[in-house]
Image (cartoon, grey):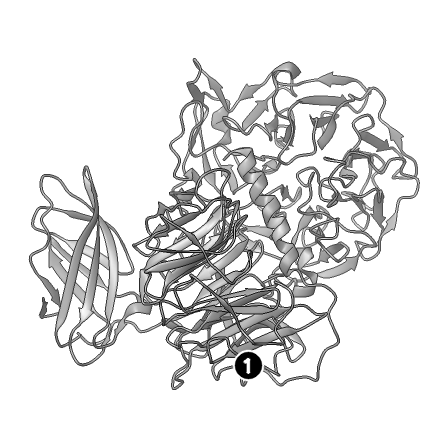
Amino acid sequence: MRRTRILTAVLALAAGLLSGAPTALAADPPPVKIAADTYTWKNARIDGGGFVPGIVFNRTEKNLAYARTDIGGAYRWQEASKTWTPLLDSVGWDDWGHTGVVSIASDSVDPNRVYAAVGTYTNSWDPKNGAVMRSSNRGASWQKANLPFKLGGNMPGRGMGERLAVDPNRNSVLYLGAPSGKGLWRSTDSGVTWSQVANFPNAGNYVADPSDTSGYSSDNQGIVWVTFDESTGTSGSATKTIYVGVADKDNAVYRSTDAGATWQRLAGQPTGYLAHKGVLDAKNGYLYLAYSDKGGPYDGGKGQLWRYATGTGAWTNISPVAEADTFYGFSGLTVDRQKPGTVMATAYSAWWPDTQIFRSTNSGATWTKAWDYTSYPNRENRYTMDVSSAPWLTWGANPQPPEQTPKLGWMTEALEIDPFNSNRMMYGTGATIYGTENLGNWDNGGKFTVKPMVQGLEETAVNDLASPPSGAPLLSALGDIGGFRHTDLTKVPSMMFTQPNFTTTTSLDFAESNPNTVVRVGNLDSGPHIAFSTDNGANWFAGTDPSGVSGGGTVASAADGSRFVWSPEGAGVHHTTGFGTSWQASGGIPAGAIVESDRVDPRTFYGFKSGKFYVSTDGGATFKESPATGLPSGDSVRFKALPGGKGDIWLAGGAPDGAYGLWHSTDGGTSFTKLPNVEQADTVGFGKAAPGASYQTLYTSAKIGGVRGIFRSTDKGASWTRVNDDAHQWGWTGAAITGDPRVYGRVYVSTNGRGVIYGDSSDGGTTGPGPGPTPTGACKVTYKVTSQWSGGFQADVQLTNTGTGPWNGWSLNWAFADGQKLTQAWNAEAAQSGTTVTAKNVGWNGTVAAGASVSFGFTANWSGTNTKPAAFKLGDQSCS
């Protein structure tokens, strides 16, 4: 992935928080009684998806490791399952910034203790100060010490560190390096209270871009790491020697030899660079330093590696390549605690053709590389890559040498060798955690295997969600990696949306009565900003942009998929018939409006902008302003029309200093009624009606009865049930929400850094109907080969209930005539025995009403000829 794509996506993600970020809350209205339900919460698996700037192993307990993310919380490694467990899901709406983790520290004296320095932005984007979270049970629960300044888990320089450190001899003492000129801070009571180290001489002076008026790139990156020399203390007494890294190119490293009483700049140190990392090999008496000319994680064009002899004060340049030959900075830095002369470092900002990892087994005297050129552009790797567990990491790319896919990585600022296992190494990238468990092969002439070691760590920012009534149960619009079609929530999809591959997908929609038609819009460096699918999002083709489009905006599909309305960035609202080959400007609606479609009438579309609601009844050609009043005046609004209910619209949004809540219209937006029992609401979505109910279930991220949470209503909002709890809050959840039209109680929740969360209710009906009695009555099958290539093909099957009664479970059989072999299926459980294929429903699509249809697809191998099956049977019933 090229640097500009990552940078654009992350900055867009940061800016995107502004529109929905909560500010100071208004006084609470009188309490409303709310019910509660017990839910089981999981992630729709993507595995990774964002930047992991820090990995920390405990130095005294095997297999205890933590990872920090820039916006998505912290995680603990589970050795038995080789997965990560999220630790900060309890962070609530008001403290959303505390899901950004700038540093993490594991106590080597008491491994049950772990600390996290949290806060997402140091500028105005995050309204709250940072904090240090402390846990005595490995992150299962936390206490918090609020700080008098902000921290920047998603700010420039976040890959440097670790800024937070526990004294390895007297573990009640901790140090924290602060940004923004706030200096060095210390706690002497295990993180309960903090005070500034008044005599520390340098608060840093480096800023990435002094001209940035937003404060994002113009903030002083401050104190960037703290490292203790454990050999200069004894158990129970404070460690004497402490090294501190400062964002100052002329004065980057300081030391105290009296437990922090006094501090001195290390004499003879290199200048002109920032020290991203300082890692101490106490056994051999070396402090290793990784330098870059920039703060990262995106920038950095020159770098050096240095070794400082702690006993003699001698400095040695141990750079693996000459400075003139670098086009990157160094950051990822680690030593092998079992073999301390072994050192590794990364070229974190080598975006093209790939990152580089360097390894020395003689304290930096000589180095080898993870890959090198044989004859340009050909290269030889010391490693093999296996991304079968997360195949989307190839990005569907087909690069020319010397680029390869999947890449070894980018933004590789976290690199750690397991202190108890020289064969295990983990490193963070801009999209995942990679690792190996046979690192020793590097030195013996063999190849080590790099695999994703990221399962359980979900780090995507979710912009939009859709759950169609047929096809895949979940479609997602994500920051940085575009989005996915989940046919199975428990499995990683094979690829994100491609053709085109948006850096960030901002909005998506499907045709309510024809869910195979899907549209998405998003951001891209160059090329179209809109794409269409006619097979429920499995495959895509690009549309054509109207003139002036600069970003995705929002998009809506007509109920039957015959036309689309698009409100992109950089251009006004436009409409088209067909798949976007020719767009016309829509009249009567302002640029930047949010657009949605009626889910019944294919010619009716809706819009909202700055407190005004707009309606089109001519397919989006013209809009008229609704007379509705009292709606939120700003643009932090999300609204949806109810499937199956013409003109039935729900609108959520607002701000604490004005109108804020949930509104309902039953007359196509002519008038809206505000629900009196909802104080604040930011999203709204619909799911399958409760047993015995005729109206679909409502879901919202809201404040009801004085409580912030995820709520469900089965009676049009008359009463509400909170479905999450205080342990499951996920910070900011204001981008999107939807229920599942096929599974009562299931809700999909967007997060800003914890991926797509879905919950199932203990209220019953959560798994959907399973296979029941063999269906009786007439059936019809449509079998279509949608794609064919040498040796393989893809087909779609539509099964229609042409009888008079519903099916509760189905099993369809056919025989291949030419030796075709099934390889994969979706939306059905399929197996082949000899020539016979049996496809059965999965849990959510077992019920098929009379006159309704269910669809599934598969891929298979073939050779010679590919004759379609001659007959299909539903149990013993032959289908036409």
Considering depth in this image, is 353 or 665 the residue closer to the camera?
665
Is any atom of residue 397 visible in this view?
yes
- As rendered, which of 735 and 226 lies closer to the eye? 735
* Image x and y of residue 786, in percent: 22, 49
Q: Secondary structure at mark 1?
A: loop
- The answer to whether 184 appears left or right of 638 in the picture is right
Q: Quadrant of residue 27?
A: bottom right
Q: Is residue 62 visible?
A: no
- Pick the front one: 781 or 451: 781
Based on the displayed image, in which of its 4 quarters is residue 278 positioned? top right
Amino acid under label 1? Trp
Residue 340 spot, x, y in % from top left:
65, 28
Residue bearing the label numbered 1: 720
Q: Is residue 837 left or right of residue 846?
A: left
- Quadrant position of the C terminus in the picture: bottom left
* Residue 624 locus on image (x, y percent): 50, 69
Tell me what residue is drawn at x 60 percent, y 30 percent: 349
Q: Residue at x 46, y 60 (%)?
A: 465
Q: Residues within 10 Å of mark 1 (few under 14, many from 20)?
A: many
Q: Position of residue 6 (x, y in %)?
A: 55, 39
Based on the displayed image, in which of its 4 quarters is residue 269 positioned?
top right
Going 57% across and 53% down the picture, which residue do you hit?
753
In this rendering, position of residue 179 left or right of residue 298: right
Q: Is residue 411 above or below residue 521?
A: above
Along the line of sight, the residue nearer the viewer: 511 or 595: 595
Whether 351 is drawn above or below 374: the answer is: below
* Image mark count: 1
